[in-house]
């Protein structure tokens, strides 16, 4: 169990050091409490999964999905991940990576509504 945790932490660290372009772009907008003072962390191990972004104070996980997530096999994996995270008290909000590039302000507006409790978690 301890070995798996170490592997998960080292994998998360590696993912933080080499984020996808969309994750890097979103992180620039979320880091340092830039979203209405809410703290976000990135590449956070939760059980067997690594969440792209987490706001622990709101139990919110943000997943940035690329084109591969439209594949039925990937969608099934995403559903399994979402159910696991929900069973541990998290709300999962998914955004498409293209949205991060084409409509970052819209993505951030939706996230503000979520973290401020103005949208159902």
Image: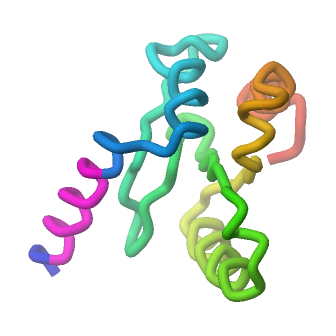
Residue lying at 56% horizontally and 23% vertically, measured from the top left: 30
Question: The N terminus lies in which quarter of the figure?
Answer: bottom left
Residue lying at 34% horizontally and 50% vertically, measured from the top left: 15
Residue lying at 14% horizontally and 65% vertically, measured from the top left: 6
Which residues make up the magenta segment?
Answer: 4-14
Say which of 27 and 54 sits in front: 27
57 lies left or right of 13:
right
Q: Return the x and y of residue 41 as percentages of the image width and height.
A: 43, 35
Figure check: 18 above or below 2: above
Quadrant for residue 9, please give it: bottom left
Q: Return the x and y of residue 70 as percentages of the image width and height.
A: 78, 71
27 lies left or right of 47:
right
Residue lying at 39% horizontally and 50% vertically, measured from the top left: 44
Q: Return the x and y of residue 20 as percentages of the image width and height.
A: 50, 45
- Dominant secondary structure of the residues highlighted in magenta in the image: helix
Figure check: 116 above or below 87: above
Quadrant for residue 71, please give it: bottom right
């Amino acid at each position: 169990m301890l070995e798996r945790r170490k592997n998960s932490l080292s994998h998360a660290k590696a993912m933080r050091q080499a984020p996808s372009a969309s994750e890097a772009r979103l992180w620039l907008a979320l880091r340092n409490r830039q979203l209405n003072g809410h703290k976000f962390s990135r590449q956070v191990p939760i059980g067997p999964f690594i969440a792209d972004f987490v706001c622990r104070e709101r139990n919110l996980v943000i997943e940035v999905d690329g084109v591969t997530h439209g594949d039925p096999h990937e969608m099934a994996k995403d559903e399994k991940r979402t159910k696991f995270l929900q069973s541990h008290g998290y709300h999962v909000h998914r955004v498409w990576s293209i949205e991060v590039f084409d409509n970052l302000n819209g993505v951030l507006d939706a996230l503000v509504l979520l973290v401020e409790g103005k949208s159902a978690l």
